[in-house]
Image (cartoon, rainbow, N blue to C red):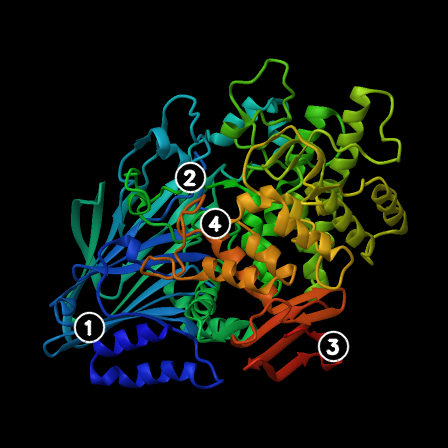
Amino acid sequence: MPKNTVFKYLKCTKKTNLFFVFFVSLWFTQTTHAQENVIWATQSNNSSESMPVGGGDIGLNLWVEKGEVYFYLSKSGTFDENNTLLKLGRVKLKLCPNTFEGKTFKQELILKDGYAQISGSNGKLNIQIKVWVDVFNPIIHLEVKSNEKVTSEVSYESWRFEDRITKGKENNQNSYKWAPQGVVKTAKDEIAFKDNGVQFYHQNKAETVFDVAVKQQGLEDRKTDLFNPLKNLIFGGFMQGDNMVAAGNYTGIYLNTPFKGWTLKSKSPSRTQNITISLNTNKATTVADWGKGILSKTNSNQKTSIKWWNDYWKKSFIYINANDEAANQSSKNYQLFRYMLGCNAFGRYPTKFNGGLFTYDPQLTDSTLKYTPDFRNWGGGTHTAQNQRLVYWPMLKSGDFDMMKPQFDFYLDLLKNAEIRTEVSWGHKGASFTEQLENFGLPNPAEYGWKRPADFNKGMEYNAWLEYEWDTVLEFCMMILETERYNGQKIEKYLPLIESSLQFFKEHYTYLAKQRGAKALDADGHLVLYPGSGAETYKMAYNSTSTIAALKTVLERLIEQPNLSQNKKAEWAEMLKTIPAISFREFNGKPTIAPAKLWERINNTESPQLYPVYPWGIYGIGKPGLDTAINTFKYDADVLKFRSHVGWKQDNIFAARLGLTDDAAKLTTGKLKDSGRRFPAFWGPGFDWTPDHNWGGSGMIGLQEMLMQVDGKKIYLFPAWPKDWNVHFKLHAPYQTTVEVELKNGKIESLKVLPESRKADVVNMIR
């Protein structure tokens, strides 16, 4: 907590809270650290001033507005017919008499235990509300306690009480985007009182955007072979409360969105009230079958959830205590964003880069977008790999290996579809994963292009940004391989994914070469990687550097796999020999890494010429060619022009990997400083949406790389760290190693490496 926040809190709270303020302020003067809770002493104006709360695969946006408690419900995998990631509604809690009409108010996110608490007093009436989500069961709990009897009303509110036609930019929330083929509508949910509670669910219609994309992309003959995650999908839940009964409906408008409410009311006033919302997302042919998956509240126990959160925070942390307030904010917001990631620890689907589970009413991000809370820019079921990777790379050093599984399984589920589209389009083997990929493995239909030349190959996206960008899947392949190296994860089931992704490059660029002439390889025996792409920026590239670095690094690591047969190792070793060398160019007479050998045009503002630095680690601390990589960062005109800390920009990571302390510190604190919104880690929209998770992820990576870098068995401490930033951190390194360090006044005061044998591999670079 920044010092000025502590003092502000001290002024607006009663004497009974002074101990808490003193306790948190100890963080600035002692080396022991407490989790830094977020505390608000006033109510919120709207949903943009909400607080994230969650667990398992559920996220809530919690706020108190005009004396009433609200939260949005979000859960992993709630994709409708159009592939919008729908929210599951909004809950409102109203108490009578209303304590929140008094002068004392407090809303607190208790990070250590993973839940939120709201309290207030009005005269002699004191009320405390605990809001928590069961990490292991999809159940949300509201627990009300008061010193006097109160009447509770809890309402389920939905803007999907009727069909809603989506037009214009509103379709950016779904897979049709700017190119709907006819009328697009969000179908209504089914909502009704049942058994003294409220049941609500969305059941996908028979035809979905999956069917539209399959037809568009010439795959109807193989439709029955394709994985379809939208078919028979039902999601929703059941809300109930102890001694509560149905109390009628009402209608209203929140911001610009009409809604309908279903209210439950306590039979009689009480000093305690327990309310639960049980959620379920599942494939079922009948609603009755789906309903069997709604768990009873008796399945829930907060102690196990608290233990999970306690262990989560012990696993990894970064605490900074510096005179530089931007540095202190960076570590505080690093922790807050890691909390947000932890809320989808066990999701069926990966955390979305464009808002995760914590989006809110869109007009509060962009006043022109007066749409429902279901809106997020860049779609719901659409997977933009260049962005997603930045959400998941930091989980290696934070030791959150189990949380990476949903992202890996996403690709594994789509492997067959990606192989089928390759076979149909080009007649060869290998998995072709495009950028802007749907959750059923085909290119997004709008990005794929509806207005295409009649003879344009069906496997290609007709899109100036995305054409020939195949290599992003290789970063996820590398992550999989890294989890084995870091934590000894069993990765055998993912090897077919890695091998098929590599096979595509071998077969596809051989295929293209033979379309042009008789030879499959160039004069040096290398693949001709043309046409290709350097991220979305260097288009129609010949031997793109990002692709070369990816293929070389993944192949080298795959060959080391002990579970691979000798024949397979030999096969991939032969392919490795065919990977061309990285190209170079000069600026100011200094050699730099080129983005490709040649390219036709620049289409975006990424710097893939530095991808050999990160994520691929070909250049870096203690490695040959570091000066050339530094020249690229300092002198490449495109790199300089594109440099920024906003959104998915990676410049802070590049600087850290190159040991450029001042640049790394400036760019990383620029990323991780307070967002300007009430919740400090709700960054964005940047290039995407709020809260921008690839903004937060790239900030996390930068801070980690400033503190610790690894190369083989070497562990470099403080390769890009300002020596006047006191810090206590615990991060993970390869070979099931943890490193915990306390740095004070430029000197290491404590170093704990487990196993202890790995201490010999540590190199202290503080200077």
Q: From the viewer's side, name the closer residue of 636 and 622.
A: 636
Q: What percent of the width, then of the height, locates residue 321?
A: 47, 77
Let me know if residue 327 appears in the view. yes
- The residue singled out by tag 1 in the image is 120
Let me know if residue 196 appears in the view. no
- The residue singled out by tag 3 in the image is 758
Q: Quadrant of the C terminus?
A: bottom right
Lower sequence index among marks 3 and 2: 2
Lower sequence index among marks 3 and 4: 4
The local crowd at label 4, few if under 14, some if 14 to 19, many if 20 or more residues have their Cα within 10 Å, is many
CB contact under 8 Å: marks 3 and 4: no
Q: Is residue 509 above or below residue 546?
A: above
- The residue singled out by tag 2 in the image is 84
Residue at the image position 78 percent from the left and 20 percent from the top: 515
Q: Quadrant of the N terminus?
A: bottom left
CB contact under 8 Å: marks 3 and 1: no
Q: Is residue 246 above or below residue 373?
A: below
- Distance of mark 3 from mark 2, alpha carbons? 47 Å
Q: Which mark is residue 647?
A: 4
The local crowd at label 1, few if under 14, some if 14 to 19, many if 20 or more residues have their Cα within 10 Å, is many
- Distance of mark 3 from mark 4, alpha carbons? 36 Å
- Distance of mark 1 from mark 4, alpha carbons? 37 Å
